[in-house]
Amino acid sequence: MLLAQGLVAPAVAAQPSGDISVKVYDPIEPVNRFIFGFNDILDRILIGPVARAYHAVLPEFMQNVVRDFTRNLKSPLIMANEALQGDGDGFGRAFGRMMMNTTVGLGGLIDVAGMHGIPYESEDFGQTLGVWGVGAGPYLVLPVLGPSNLRDTAGLVVDAVADPVSEVADATQRDEDLQWVRIFGAIDSRARSENVISDLRRNSVDYYASMRSIYFQSRNAAIKDGAGTANIPDYDEETP
């Protein structure tokens, strides 16, 4: 599951272009830069081309189905994290989205809730820890998974272990099917990020430093639900 989710983790959020200067605690920068370089090569020779082929071959409505279905699968985890954060309104929206999209939206294939003004909101245990006041800790670049920090890495592990959808899939011997769904969802997210990633690569003075700063700002914005932060476009809404 982590691999599937991590295919697009090197770019959780991005600003239009240029170098972004934000102080981030990065005590093992040489190691992180090495791993970042490996991830970048992997993206250039494999993940990026696969994502571009996916975008070119699959009709737009099918790409939307992939996105909406994978988002709906995340609903139980999102609801759990909203509850742990004490966000009753967020929990209600996540529950409403799940019920509406699972029933009227044909099992989550169609984002009916979004059509009725209930937007998708991503929540994870890393954000929950941040809301609880846990500091980010040192910046980390994980192989394949990309930018992270100590807090968010712990959050990834908790989300992976606690995901009820994975438990159901395992109990019903559909775990392999679930992995393929998540891989396609990750490819879809990477395809939607194509323009932003390409622009950032071309225009950043230091691609590593820019992505590091962007990740830091993106996570802070997510923890604060976007309040009082810089305007950072959502990657999922970019189109190639």
Image (cartoon, rainbow, N blue to C red):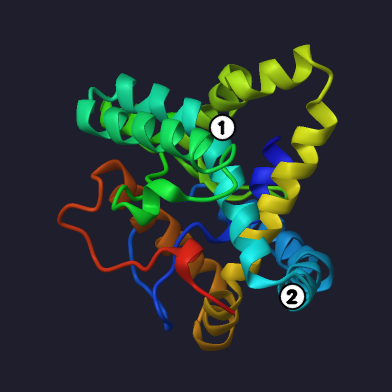
Residue 124 in sight from this viewpoint = no
Kindly identify the residue that appears in the image at 24 percent across and 66 percent down.
Answer: 230
Q: Tell which of 58 and 178 is nearer to you.
A: 58
Label ID, residue 52: 2
**Residue 188 drawn at (x, y percent):** 65, 60
Which amino acid, mark 1?
Leu
Position of residue 88 relative to residue 122, above or below, is above
Which percent across, then down, holds residue 32? 62, 53
Instruction: Please state, as top left, top right, bottom left or bottom right, where the N terminus lies in the image.
Output: top right
Q: Secondary structure at mark 1?
A: helix
Q: Position of residue 128 (x, y in %)?
A: 35, 29
**Label 2 secondary element:** helix
Q: On the image, numbered disc 1 is attached to which residue?
A: 156
Q: Residue furthest front?
A: 104
Q: Residue furthest left?
A: 228
Query: Taking 72 as reference, is 95 above or below it?
Result: above
Q: Is residue 240 visible?
A: yes
**Label 1 crowd (10 A; few <14 / some 14-19 / many >=20):** some
Q: Is residue 221 left or right of residue 155?
A: left
Residue at image location 58% in from the left, 41% down from the top:
106
**Tag 1 or tag 2, which sits nearer the N-term?**
2
Q: Residues within 10 Å of mark 2 (few under 14, many from 20)?
A: some
Q: Report whether 52 appears left or right of 126.
A: right
Q: Which quadrant of the structure image shows residue 40?
A: bottom right
The residue that appears at 27% across and 34% down in the rendered structure is: 90
- Which of label 2 and label 1 is nearer to you? 2
- 205 lies above or below 108: below
- Which quarter of the picture shows residue 132? top left
